[in-house]
Each structure stands twice: as structure tokens, then as C-alpha cells.
């Protein structure tokens, strides 16, 4: 097989992100979100004990944002001016793979998460990232965001029906239609389908908030935390579905469960799609978003047993969550050699 779509524990050459700077979008949470970005990024690019490093490129939409990002990250990052709408680079950016050893940026269509949030620049920033990465661009006529696609590096991809089969994304497409495009675009052999994602998730059920591969054959999902967890029915349904699945190599998936954050209150009493699954893997750390609930410490402890080759650390994502996501959502990684 000449196409290589490695798991995120494999070596990465670069991490891309977009610096939050739009006061109209972030309102009172802009400075807290910038502080959380900085703390998270410093942790995720920390070199491993053996000297493995991860380059960081931050896209900034204005001169003021560029200066802010440079103050926050200093020598740790390359800061580049580019136009984009919002910070969710996982969804607006490409999916990177390698073909015959050469970097390829796969770009699906982006329509503002089913037409909910269509901002200037969000449908073109993927091309900017591809160019910065020196990757060949390949475009496919499927509406899909990176956060909707989770892969194991050995031919298996997991997604949700709620997202990719949604009429607001791909009207008229069935599972076979979507699978055909994903297999052609990414070189995967098998697509696994979860029905639905978190309650109140404006992405329509992105997989990176509910199921992640720890390594080939091993998936992680969440267990409810506390008596008032608003996601209890969804989380139990996900675990039941995973229990009956096999991957592209015929292995029955080993399902590991970690505590969810439980109910997270951002001040308005509304249910929010808080998740510990939105971690990012760096050379040294697995950085897990936490939200000030007791479930955070319990989740980090559980993940330490799942990622024995990394230091698992929690970092606050409460302010970033007010924008709709967490750490995995705001980053786009380029596969290494």
C-alpha cells in the first residue's frame, strides 16, 4: 500500500492552528481562550525525553493577532498571516497523509458545519495550510470535516451517521456513497459507523468528541460522570455499538472507557458538548481538555494507563469550549516521514 494515513501516535512533522482574535466571536472569553491556547500549545509541542520535536505553525488573521501569538508562544512557533473565519483548523484544514513518501493534503468540501456558521476564509484556509506544508492538494466532492474522521493507521476509519449522512452535509448520500469517497481519498479499507454524537454538539456529532483510537485495535470512549450527566444515554449507546465492531484487520475492538466531564456549566445553564476525548498527542504529552469538574482528574488518571509511552496531562479548555470545541478541534497535524 503506497498511501499512508498514520495514527496520531505516529511521528508528526508539524501542527497547525489558528490564533483566536475575533472579539465579536469570542466576546468576554477572548483573552481567557488565548491563555488556554498558549498553555495547551506549549505543552503539546514539548520535546520528548529522546529529543523528538514537533514544529508549530500558528495562523493569525490580523497584525494584532500576529503580535499576540508571538508574545504568547515566542520561539516555540512560526506565526504566519492568513485569512480565516474561526479557529477550528481540524475542520477547515486538510487531512494529511503520505503517498509514496510524499506529503498529500486531502481537502473535502467545507460548508460551515451544515450551513450553521459560514465565515469568510474558512472554506479556503485548507489550501493555505496545504501550501505551507509543501503538500500536494487532492480535493474530493464530499462535505466532511476533519473532526468527523478518526482513523487507526491500519485501514480503519470511524465516523458518525449524524454528521456525514446529514442532509445538511451530503443530501442523497447513503453509507456506501460516503464510504466509497473516504476509501478513495484516504486509502482506508473499512469504515465504522456510530449513530450519534454528543447532545448539543453544533458539529452534528463529530467523532473526535466521542470515540478515539488509542492505537490500532483499541478505542476509547466515555462513561457518564455524576448523577446529572446530560450525555448519559448517548455515551451508553456509543459503548454498546463499539462492543460489536471489528476493524479492517478483523480484530474485535478493545473498548476502554474513561470518565466524561459530567455536567459542565458555563454560566447560562445550557447543556454543552464538553468532552475529555478531544485530546492532542505531542512528542512528550497527551494533552487532555478539562473543564473544572472532578471527572477531569479521573479521566487523566485513566488515560495514563492507556498511553504508557506518553505523559498524560490535563489543561483547561473552558474558555475554548465557549466557542464550540477544544484542543483537537483547533489543531491540524501533518503526518511525519
Image (cartoon, helix red, strand yellow):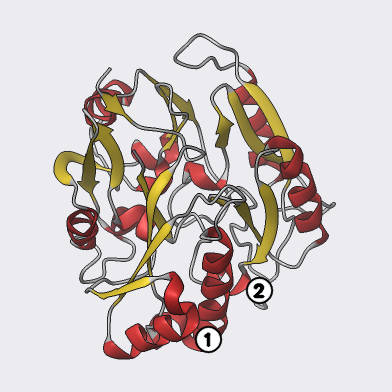
Which label sits on residue 148?
none
Find residue 273 and report its image quarter: bottom right
Structural distance between the alpha carbons of marks 1 and 2: 16 Å
Q: Which residue is mark 2?
A: 266
Left or right position of 75 against 84: right
Answer yes or no: do the residues labelled 1 and 2 have beta carbons within 8 Å?
Answer: no
Left or right position of 191 against 2: right
- Secondary structure, mark 2, is loop
Q: Position of residue 176 (x, y in %)?
A: 29, 20
Left or right position of 29 against 7: right
Left or right position of 324 against 19: right
Q: Position of residue 331 (x, y in %)?
A: 42, 58
Q: Which residue is mark 1?
A: 31
Q: Position of residue 254 (x, y in %)?
A: 66, 21
Find residue 140 and report its image quarter: top left
Front-lying residue, 18 or 98:
98
N-term-proximal mark, 1 vs 2 = 1
Front-lying residue, 283 or 39:
283
- Secondary structure, mark 1, is helix
Q: Please identify the residue farthest to the bottom as the structure is shown.
A: 64
Q: Crowding near pointer 1: few (<14 within 10 Å), some, many (20+)?
A: some
Q: Is residue 58 above or below residue 46?
A: below
**The C terminus appears in which quarter of the rendering?**
top left
Q: Nearer the viewer, mark 1 or mark 2?
A: 1
The residue drawn where x is 27% and y is 49% is 94
The residue drawn where x is 44% and y is 49% is 204
The residue drawn where x is 16% and y is 39% is 141
Find residue 223 and report its image quarter: top right
The residue drawn where x is 21% and y is 28% is 100
Q: Is residue 223 above or below residue 201?
A: above
Q: Position of residue 7 (x, y in %)?
A: 46, 34
Amino acid at each position: 500500500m503506497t498511501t499512508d494515513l498514520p495514527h496520531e501516535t505516529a511521528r508528526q512533522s508539524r501542527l497547525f492552528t489558528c490564533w483566536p482574535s475575533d472579539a465579536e466571536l469570542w466576546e468576554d472569553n477572548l483573552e481567557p481562550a488565548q491563555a488556554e491556547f498558549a498553555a495547551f500549545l506549549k505543552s503539546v509541542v514539548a520535546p520528548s525525553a529522546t529529543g523528538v520535536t514537533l514544529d508549530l505553525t500558528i495562523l493569525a488573521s490580523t497584525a494584532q493577532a500576529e503580535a499576540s501569538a508571538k508574545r504568547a508562544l515566542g520561539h516555540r512557533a512560526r506565526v504566519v498571516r492568513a485569512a480565516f473565519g474561526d479557529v477550528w483548523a481540524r475542520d477547515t484544514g486538510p487531512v494529511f497523509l503520505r503517498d509514496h513518501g510524499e506529503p498529500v493534503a486531502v481537502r473535502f468540501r467545507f460548508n460551515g458545519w451544515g450551513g450553521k456558521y459560514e465565515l469568510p476564509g474558512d472554506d479556503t484556509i485548507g489550501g493555505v495550510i496545504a501550501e505551507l506544508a509543501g503538500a500536494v492538494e487532492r480535493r474530493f466532492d464530499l462535505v466532511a470535516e476533519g473532526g468527523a474522521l478518526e482513523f487507526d493507521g491500519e485501514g480503519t476509519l470511524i465516523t458518525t451517521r449524524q454528521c456525514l449522512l446529514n442532509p445538511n452535509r451530503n443530501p442523497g448520500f447513503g453509507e456506501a456513497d460516503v464510504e466509497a469517497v473516504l476509501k478513495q481519498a484516504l486509502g482506508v479499507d473499512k469504515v465504522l459507523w456510530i449513530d450519534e454524537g454528543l447532545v448539543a454538539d453544533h458539529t452534528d456529532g463529530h467523532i473526535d468528541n466521542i470515540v478515539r483510537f488509542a492505537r490500532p485495535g483499541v478505542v476509547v470512549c466515555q462513561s457518564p460522570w455524576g448523577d446529572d450527566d446530560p450525555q448519559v444515554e448517548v455515551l451508553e449507546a456509543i459503548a454498546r455499538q463499539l462492543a460489536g465492531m471489528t476493524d479492517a484487520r478483523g480484530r474485535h475492538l478493545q473498548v476502554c472507557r474513561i470518565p466524561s466531564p459530567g455536567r459542565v456549566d458555563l454560566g447560562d445553564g445550557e447543556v454543552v458538548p464538553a468532552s475529555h476525548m478531544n485530546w492532542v498527542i505531542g512528542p512528550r504529552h497527551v494533552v487532555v481538555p478539562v473543564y473544572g469538574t472532578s471527572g477531569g482528574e479521573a479521566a487523566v488518571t485513566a488515560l495514563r494507563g492507556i498511553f504508557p509511552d506518553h505523559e498524560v496531562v490535563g489543561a483547561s479548555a473552558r474558555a475554548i469550549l465557549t466557542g464550540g470545541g477544544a484542543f483537537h478541534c483547533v489543531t491540524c497535524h501533518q503526518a511525519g516521514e
